[in-house]
Protein backbone atom coordinates (compact mmCIF):
# COMPACT_ATOMS: atom_id res chain seq x y z
CA UNK A 1 0.00 0.00 0.00
CA UNK A 2 1.25 3.49 -0.84
CA UNK A 3 1.36 5.77 2.23
CA UNK A 4 2.72 8.92 0.62
CA UNK A 5 1.07 12.23 1.40
CA UNK A 6 -1.33 13.80 -1.09
CA UNK A 7 -0.10 16.22 -3.73
CA UNK A 8 2.17 18.82 -2.08
CA UNK A 9 0.35 18.30 1.26
CA UNK A 10 3.13 19.98 3.23
CA UNK A 11 3.20 23.06 1.02
CA UNK A 12 -0.45 23.34 0.03
CA UNK A 13 -0.85 26.83 1.50
CA UNK A 14 1.97 28.20 -0.67
CA UNK A 15 0.91 26.78 -4.04
CA UNK A 16 -0.63 30.06 -5.15
CA UNK A 17 1.94 32.36 -3.52
CA UNK A 18 3.91 34.94 -5.50
CA UNK A 19 7.08 32.94 -4.79
CA UNK A 20 5.62 29.80 -6.35
CA UNK A 21 4.43 31.77 -9.39
CA UNK A 22 7.95 33.16 -9.80
CA UNK A 23 9.47 29.69 -9.39
CA UNK A 24 7.16 28.27 -12.06
CA UNK A 25 7.91 31.11 -14.48
CA UNK A 26 11.64 30.70 -13.96
CA UNK A 27 11.41 26.92 -14.45
CA UNK A 28 9.88 27.61 -17.86
CA UNK A 29 12.00 30.66 -18.67
CA UNK A 30 12.96 29.41 -22.11
CA UNK A 31 9.26 29.38 -23.09
CA UNK A 32 8.30 32.53 -21.18
CA UNK A 33 11.32 34.75 -21.83
CA UNK A 34 13.14 32.94 -24.63
CA UNK A 35 16.20 32.34 -22.45
CA UNK A 36 17.38 29.43 -20.33
CA UNK A 37 19.93 31.62 -18.52
CA UNK A 38 18.67 31.85 -14.91
CA UNK A 39 20.24 35.25 -14.28
CA UNK A 40 18.77 36.76 -17.45
CA UNK A 41 15.34 35.25 -16.68
CA UNK A 42 15.46 36.66 -13.13
CA UNK A 43 16.14 40.13 -14.57
CA UNK A 44 13.15 39.80 -16.91
CA UNK A 45 10.79 38.56 -14.19
CA UNK A 46 8.23 41.16 -13.09
CA UNK A 47 7.62 40.58 -9.35
CA UNK A 48 4.54 42.84 -9.39
CA UNK A 49 3.00 40.79 -12.15
CA UNK A 50 3.78 37.58 -10.24
CA UNK A 51 1.97 39.02 -7.19
CA UNK A 52 -1.00 39.97 -9.36
CA UNK A 53 -1.20 36.49 -10.89
CA UNK A 54 -0.88 34.85 -7.46
CA UNK A 55 -3.72 36.99 -6.10
CA UNK A 56 -6.01 35.80 -8.90
CA UNK A 57 -4.87 32.18 -9.07
CA UNK A 58 -7.35 29.47 -8.21
CA UNK A 59 -6.12 25.92 -7.71
CA UNK A 60 -8.17 22.79 -7.58
CA UNK A 61 -6.18 19.59 -7.29
CA UNK A 62 -8.13 16.43 -7.98
CA UNK A 63 -7.18 12.81 -8.14
CA UNK A 64 -8.06 10.95 -11.33
CA UNK A 65 -11.01 9.37 -9.53
CA UNK A 66 -12.34 12.72 -8.30
CA UNK A 67 -12.06 14.11 -11.80
CA UNK A 68 -14.55 11.55 -13.03
CA UNK A 69 -17.00 12.33 -10.22
CA UNK A 70 -17.21 16.11 -10.47
CA UNK A 71 -19.11 18.03 -13.12
CA UNK A 72 -16.07 20.00 -14.33
CA UNK A 73 -18.10 22.12 -16.76
CA UNK A 74 -20.26 23.24 -13.85
CA UNK A 75 -17.17 24.14 -11.83
CA UNK A 76 -15.81 26.16 -14.73
CA UNK A 77 -19.08 28.09 -14.90
CA UNK A 78 -18.98 28.74 -11.14
CA UNK A 79 -15.42 30.05 -11.31
CA UNK A 80 -16.23 32.21 -14.34
CA UNK A 81 -19.27 33.66 -12.58
CA UNK A 82 -17.23 34.43 -9.46
CA UNK A 83 -14.50 36.12 -11.50
CA UNK A 84 -17.10 38.20 -13.32
CA UNK A 85 -18.70 39.16 -10.00
CA UNK A 86 -15.32 40.24 -8.59
CA UNK A 87 -14.19 42.04 -11.75
CA UNK A 88 -14.89 45.46 -10.25
CA UNK A 89 -12.74 44.71 -7.20
CA UNK A 90 -9.60 43.82 -9.20
Image: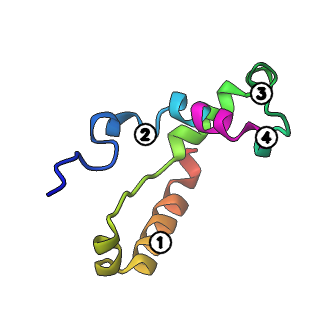
Structural distance between the alpha carbons of marks 3 and 2: 21 Å
Structural distance between the alpha carbons of marks 3 and 1: 33 Å
Q: Determine which residue is flagged by label 2.
A: 15
Q: Are marks 1 and 4 in contact (CB under 8 Å)?
A: no
Name the residue at 54% across, 62% down.
Answer: 84
Of callouts 4 and 3, which one flags the residue occurring earlier in the amino acid sequence? 4
Q: Quadrant of the N terminus?
A: bottom left
Q: Nearer the viewer, residue 27 or 42?
A: 27
Q: Determine which residue is flagged by label 3.
A: 41
Structural distance between the alpha carbons of marks 4 and 2: 22 Å
Q: Quadrant of the C terminus?
A: top right
| Residue 46 found in image quarter | top right
Structural distance between the alpha carbons of marks 4 and 3: 8 Å
Magenta region: which residues?
23-30
Q: Is 12 placed above or below 43 here?
A: below
SS at mark 4 in the image: helix
Q: Determine which residue is flagged by label 4.
A: 30
Of callouts 1 and 4, which one flags the residue occurring earlier in the amino acid sequence? 4
Q: Nearer the viewer, residue 58 or 88?
A: 58
Magenta-drawn stretch contains 47: no
Of callouts 1 and 2, which one flags the residue occurring earlier in the amino acid sequence? 2
User: Residue 13's spot in the image, x, y percent?
Assistant: 34, 36
48 sits to left or right of 5: right
Q: Determine which residue is flagged by label 1.
A: 76
Structural distance between the alpha carbons of marks 1 and 4: 30 Å
Of callouts 3 and 2, which one flags the residue occurring earlier in the amino acid sequence? 2
Q: Main secondary structure of the magenta part?
A: helix
SS at mark 3 in the image: helix
Callout in the foreground (4, 2)? 4
Amino acid sequence: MDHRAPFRANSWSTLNSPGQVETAVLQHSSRVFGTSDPQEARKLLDAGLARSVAARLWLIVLSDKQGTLLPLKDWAAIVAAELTRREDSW
